[in-house]
Amino acid sequence: MKYEPHNYQKYAMEFILTHPIAALLLDMGLGKTVITLTAIMELMYERFEVQKVLVIAPLRVARDTWPAEIAKWDHLSGLTYAVAIGTKAERLAALRTKADIHIINRENVQWLVEESGLPFDYDMVVVDELSSFKSYRAKRFKSLLSVRRTVKRIVGLTGTPSSNGLMDLWAQFRLLDLGQRLGRYISRYRDKYFLPDKRNAQVVFTYKLKPGAEAEIYNAISDITISMKAEDYLDLPPCIHNVVKVALSKKEREVYDEFKKEMVVSLGGQEIDAMNAAALSNKLLQMANGAVYDEGHSSHQIHDRKLDALEDLIESANGKPVMVCYWFQHDLERIHNRIEARELKTAQDIEDWNTGKIPVALVHPASAGHGLNLQYGGCTLIWFGLTWSLELYQQTNKRLHRQGQKDTVVIHHILAEGTMDELVLEALHRKDKTQAALIDAVKAVLEV
């Protein structure tokens, strides 16, 4: 296929070419993969500035999306690549293959750096979904940071840089610029821009921004960062968010309320308890969905309200393909028991979905939330159970509402009234304000 880039894509590619350190906060669906590959092609075969590139991405994105994009566009036909996933032997074979680009999943970064025995001789690194390196305690972050100085060029790609607040930015930019802009130490970054918020004696649980700190952070990273929202550059079809509320019966409500109050309840002869607030929140979300795990990880059914609503929504789609997001394993099992559906796991599953062969697809946000092109298979998404992660929530929604989608996208949220469901959706909206401020603050200004 011939690549005819939009003006914003030309701008983003030029930004990579002119910035050895580049953070591209591109909204989902703007084509960050082909933008980056086009820049790599230019750097390798026109400017001769790069010889060997490492791409780090989520597993399915590494396996499916990057190879598919290279194969899709005519101007990239000269690029060679090897995908280093699978067994140790398969990974080693791929990494020993002479290729322009080695593609590896993020879970194997530590293995590559510390255990593979191979030299880390890449002069350019692309981190797809840079936000997955937001934890400075993670092994993948420490391993990649240890070899960062050997890399001449680095590109960080993400659409959700600060899904849980601006504290997330430090590790990502420490990896990119080795601490030049936000500092080399998280403690100093925290002391400079934040104040303790929620605490218990000397233990601080959360931090809040100091007055004026938000603008200072944005200004500090602005020279190596551009940000673009899809709504500014693409004529996407409308996206409608719909809330479908279900009501628990009196008996079901009593079980939920008892557990919420006492943090313990007896179901099916088993005592189910929550040791702390986090565990309580998790259990209440399970109950809102219709079942809950005991200590032995056996599930106990409480209600079928969401399954009934799901069945109604699928029926109202009148045969059009529907994608359903689940969160807990017992959600998946109960959906399978009620509805004929197919979980998207393999490359073949994704191809079958995009060619209209799957009427009802099941996805977990943690595995299908990043990078997958699913917009060709349908335009209806149903959240059976929500996640606290704004990043996964937004990324999953953008699997359908992205470039290439022809129809109005409808996103249904099945919520149990008066439960944690409602609080989670409110929390997702609150977090979005912080991230939206970051995106707006460093948004590229160009005429399209």
Image (tube, helix red, strand yellow):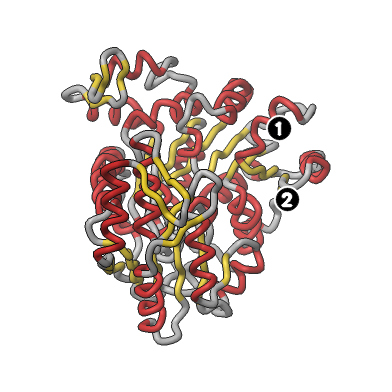
Which residue shows up at 63% across the image and 34% down it? Answer: 49
Work out how far the residue at label 1 is from the one at label 2, CA to CA, in angstroms. Answer: 20 Å
Q: Which residue is mark 1?
A: 112
Check disc 2: other Cα within 10 Å, few if <14, some if 14-19, many if 20+: some
Q: Nearer the viewer, residue 302 or 368?
A: 302
Check disc 1: other Cα within 10 Å, few if <14, some if 14-19, many if 20+: many
Q: Quadrant of residue 281?
A: top left
The residue most toward the bottom is 318
At label 1, the amino acid type is Leu
Q: Secondary structure at mark 1?
A: helix
Q: Is residue 232 depicted above or below 358 in this figure?
A: above
Residue 417 rendering spot, x and y as whole percentages? 24, 61
Residue 5 rendering spot, x and y as whole percentages? 47, 59
Looking at the image, residue 81 sits to the left or right of residue 39; the answer is: right
At label 2, the amino acid type is Thr
Which residue shows up at 37% across the image and 75% down it? Answer: 308
Given this view, does label 1 or label 2 mark the residue nearer the observer?
1
Q: Quadrant of residue 209?
A: top left
Q: Which residue is mark 2?
A: 80
Q: Is residue 2 depicted above or below 178 in this figure?
A: below
Query: In this orientation, does residue 53 appear?
Result: yes
Q: Nearer the viewer, residue 190 or 43?
A: 190
Q: Quadrant of residue 34?
A: bottom right
Residue 421 rendering spot, x and y as whole percentages? 30, 55
Looking at the image, residue 164 sits to the left or right of residue 136; the answer is: left
Which residue shows up at 54% across the image and 53% down it? Answer: 298
Q: Secondary structure at mark 2?
A: loop
Which residue shows up at 50% across the image and 56% down it? Answer: 299
Q: Quadrant of the C terminus?
A: bottom left
